[in-house]
Image (tube, helix red, strand yellow):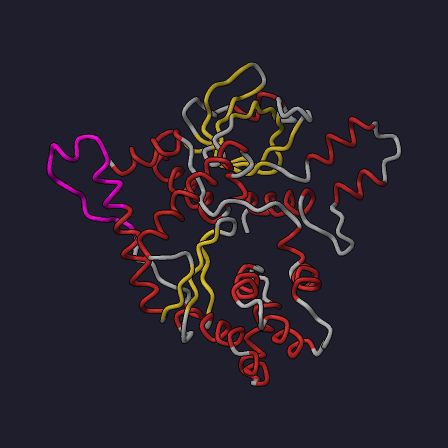
Amino acid sequence: MDETEAIRITDHFILRYRLPDGSTVVDRFIAGRKGLTPSDQELLLGWRDPVEGLFEVRRKDGDAVVLLNLIDDVEYRTYANVGRAAFRGVSRGGFLHTCLVPLHPSGEAWLVSGAMSHYPRSSASEIAQEALRLATHHPELVFRNPEKTEQGWQWMRADRAAFVEFCGGDELVLPPAEAEDLLNAYYRHGQEAAGAARPGRARSGRQPGPDLPSFKLPRELAAADTVGVIYDEVDGLNFYGDYGMLRDLFAEPALTGRRRHQDLLRTYLREESITPLPIRRLAAAHPETVDAVFRKLLRKPGFTWNEDGDALLRRRKPWYYESAPRPGVSVIGDRLGRLLGEGRR
């Protein structure tokens, strides 16, 4: 690997990597330095959650540069521990790829941590595309900004309402090919409606064709007999393999005696890629049979969903309950939107 990649890996290990006991290198550093003041400890503990992003340079201000994170749409007044020399060659309108850690708990000052890569203004189109990719694949970077979190919830609620109107409900069970066709039709419908609403479209009479990529299910879902498509108010839009078989199990508990049905339910309980949502949905839809299903599966004659169901899910899927839910829609900032638009032109 090159030097920049090695620095990024080392920085990630020091600040964020969880050691076998759950602590970080920062935690161990604090534990081994008895002379640190409470404010020192608070500062260092904040370094365990650095801000990773692609930043546009807004201006220089003394020893600092003011950076706009294109991913979370927040400005950061940023310093370097070697002084202003670190920003030599960095010009207004250019871009930086780096991580920042707080210099003050108030969030009014930040420090470059690890590697810092600089890109000229002419790279705006490529930088914008990469920022969009990060916002899509790592939404936690967007939702550092509470305003973007609230906007995400608003957009997701609107999108869910449109989905329900178009598809006839928020929970569907379809063969994989039909699920793909339905989602592609829904996305085309949404883009055409958005295009028609843009100013000037009605006057010109010309509607652009949809430019969204074709929606494809992952290979393991495409190979399933059925796919469950659930657009939940909290968990967002999700897809579940062989959901029809699982639904049949809850409708007819006698199927729990079949190995294939048992293994499927165990997979839904075990896999970290599956949230508690589908099991909660099926339990709510089949209150008369849910106890029988889990009594047979768990071999616990006294199990009742109302008393034991939540504890079961928390025990099997603790990761789901460790943090507050986030919206399933990432909302980009105005500046990133403009850069993406300029790139298309």
Q: Is residue 337 left or right of residue 256?
A: left
Q: Residue at x 68, y 42 (%)?
A: 15
Q: Residue at x 47, y 51 (%)?
A: 236
Name the one closer to the observer, 56 or 181: 181
Q: Is residue 186 above or below residue 111?
A: below
Q: Name the residue furthest right.
A: 34
Q: Is residue 290 above or below residue 170?
A: below
Classify the position of the C terminus by image quarter.
top left
Name the one closer to the observer, 200 or 110: 200
Q: Is residue 77 above or below residue 72?
A: above
- Pinpoint residue 318: horizontal percent, then vertical percent: 67, 57
- Pinpoint residue 68: horizontal percent, then vertical percent: 48, 27
Q: Residue at x 58, y 81 (%)?
A: 256
Name the one closer to the observer, 60 or 50: 50
Q: What range of the chain is rendered magenta?
A: 191-212
- The reply to whether residue 76 is visible in this rendering is yes
- Pinpoint residue 242: horizontal percent, then vertical percent: 46, 72
Residue 201 drawn in magenta: yes
Name the one closer to the observer, 172 or 92: 172
Residue 215 drawn in magenta: no
Task: State the image quarter where residue 170 is shown.
Answer: bottom left
- Pinpoint residue 171: horizontal percent, then vertical percent: 42, 60
Q: Is residue 179 left or right of residue 312?
A: left
Q: Is residue 344 left or right of residue 321?
A: left
